[in-house]
Amino acid sequence: MMNKNAISLLAAFLLMIILSVVSIRVGAVSVPFKEIWLTLQTQPNKSFFIVHELRMPRVAVAILAGIGLSVGGVILQSVLRNPLASPDVIGLTKGAGFLAAAVLFLFPASPSYWLPLAALAGAFLAFALLLLLTRRLTLPPATLALVGIAIGAAFGAGTQYLIVKHPRDISLALLWLAGSLWGRNWHDVWTLLPWIVILLPAAWLSFSKLNVLQFNDMTGASLGLNIFRERFLLILLAVALAGICVSAVGAIGFVGLLAPHIARSLAGPRHQRLIPLAALIGADLMLLGDFLGRIIIAPREVPAGIMTAVIGAPYFVYLLRRERRMRSTKQA
Amino acid sequence: MPRFMKRLNSFTALILLLLLVTACGQTGSNNQAETPAANTGTETSKSADGSITVEDATGTVTLTKRPERIITMEFSFADALATLGVQPVGAADDDDPALFMDEVKSKLTNYTSVGSRYEPNIEVISSLQPDLIIVDLVKHKEVMEQLKGIAPLLVLDDYQADYEQMLKNYMIIAKAVGKKAEGQKRLEEHEAKIADAKSKLQSTDLKVLPAVVNPKGFFAHSDHAYTGSFLAKLGFTDPVKDENSYPQLTLEQLVETNPQVLFLMPTEKETIVNQWEANSLWNKIDAVANKKVFTVERRDWSLARGLIGSEKMASDIVNSLGK
């Protein structure tokens, strides 16, 4: 008999495979399965480029970024003990967005690799500011979240200023800020992959610490954890995971909020189960958002960041309502 | 605890240092990729075997034969092909053919839209099997590597171009599609048309300001911008003298710059100017007092940015200010 947890894991995994295949099959140009099969046998035909150079790397980037953003979200929600925590809340995506916008507006002719580097630097800059302003994260988690929001607001204001100051160039910046998988290639995959391969196991291996930290500091301390150090290392882990993903796909914040919630409602609070499931659900969300964004107004595209929010927001509301209902029935 | 704090401190410093080092290292190693951008050379040759060599904004492009399936990723590139009698197989038109000027559209009879100019659909581009893609240096830099896998690229700086740069780009396109002589001839025709327009203007000793207006604001096009640079070329004076291409002006600032002629490019029917007209300050502007405020098509004046577009601008100006 398989338990519920294994079933949800398997379902999320199968959904990921199905979405990947559909993403490779369908698009502005339709590639029949037979041709996909032929391209896999390295018979260069006219669909080879579309399958191998456009859709496959895009699917891979969607999966990797979905994993990074959602696992980053899980860690932040648990460590900050705040259900609203996500890479957005500690100012990370806003910091990345600000430096990315600065590059787009102030150095439009800069080489293309500047943009992800600037975004990554922005994410870590936001984290460094958080360290400075919260006495190196020793303040209570609720305060950490508030300071993070303040940092994010400041960076957000900076981005707004740049947008207002350069009204003509905003299309490029808005596309990046919305978060998009357009034009992502194998180079992006190879940049993301090593980070995810190293950081995802690191996150999973921290499950026992996360299980303890999500309650309160007293429990953690009484169980012999160096609360402040563990909290710092875990938030750093989340920042690295989410930061590298944001630098690759733009400021897609919502996946990092939504995927952990869906996973939590299916797998419960234990992180040894929660982290793998959230990773898969994050990948599913990104794949679905990117796929819909690609076909909905083809040949134009809706950025994946917008689509994930459009499909995710109603489900999020449903989830919150159901949670409340369950809680009230429990009390009664 | 204090010892841990200290360690934490140095750790933070280490992160920042690391970021700095990686950022610096990256800039150093890739500088040479940037330098040829300034070079918009004109040397080309058409060798005996029919191959075409041309200098674009990033370097030398060699085409084995005259390209026949061309994709344009900006309006001005399509404008150039239209004047040369070349049909692109695909064009980025933001999926709205109405954004092409009527004259350009009538010449582009049978093309496939490749979608947005900012995020053109690479799948469609690949399925059209082009043999030349004309891209913008700034807008499309993120996908140049991918596009190179489909077809040779002609990279031109249109996004930041002024009028003179556009003329240079025009000749590069003409050479790349193997129509150097036609291009030269058309360019001379263009120069004659512009000179003719100039002669029809009584005086160009005027402060003329073109501006895009939308419900939120008034965006002047200074002489760093394409439209402004064209007016400067005709001999008009730019009243804003701003180092930015598109400075946003308030009504007070506009009154202070006091243009003698205004060309407004509204993005929609109701704009900020409708509110300003009710303000007595508006009537203090020379252009308003002398009834020299003209409304022109933003599509023709700001989006088109080619020979046909500039000629339309010149004729609009002659119709408004000529004898």
Image (spheres, coloured by chain):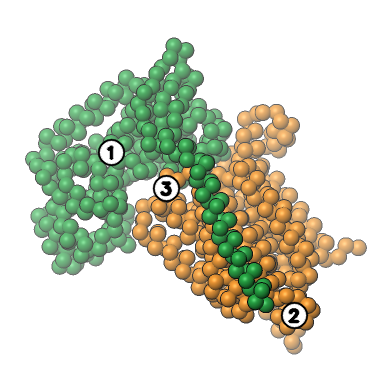
Chain colours: A orange, B green
Check disc 3 and give the amino acid type: Pro
Please name the residue shown 25% across and 63% down the image.
Answer: B250
On the image, which quarter does residue B200 sit in?
top left
Q: Determine whether A173 is above or below B41 in the image.
A: below
Residue B239, numbered label: none
Q: Numbered disc 3: what chain?
A: A
The alpha-carbon separation of the residues under discs 3 and 1 comes to 19 Å
**Residue position for label 3:** A108
Give the residue pinned by disc 1.
Answer: B163
- Quadrant into which the C terminus of chain B falls: top left
Camera-side mark, 2 or 3: 2
| CA distance for labels 2 and 3 | 50 Å
| Image spot of residue B55 (x, y percent) | 41, 27
- Disc 2 element: helix
Up-down relation of residue A100 to residue A73 (above or below): above
Please tell me whether mark 1 sits on a helix, a strand or a loop. helix
Q: Position of residue A4 (x, y in %)?
A: 83, 66
At a point 67% along the width and 77% down the height, the residue shown is B1
Residue type indicated by callout 1: Tyr
How many tags in the picture? Answer: 3
x 16%, y 41%: residue: B235
Marks 2 and 3, the one that precedes in the sequence: 3
The amino acid beneath tag 2 is Ala
The chain under label 2 reads A
Q: Is residue A23 left or right of residue B105?
A: right
Of the pair B233 and A146, the residue shown nearer to us:
A146
Q: Position of residue B173 (x, y in %)?
A: 38, 28
Disc 3 on helix, strand or loop?
loop
The residue carrying pointer 3 sits among few (fewer than 14), some (14 to 19) or many (20 or more) residues within 10 Å by Cα, namely some
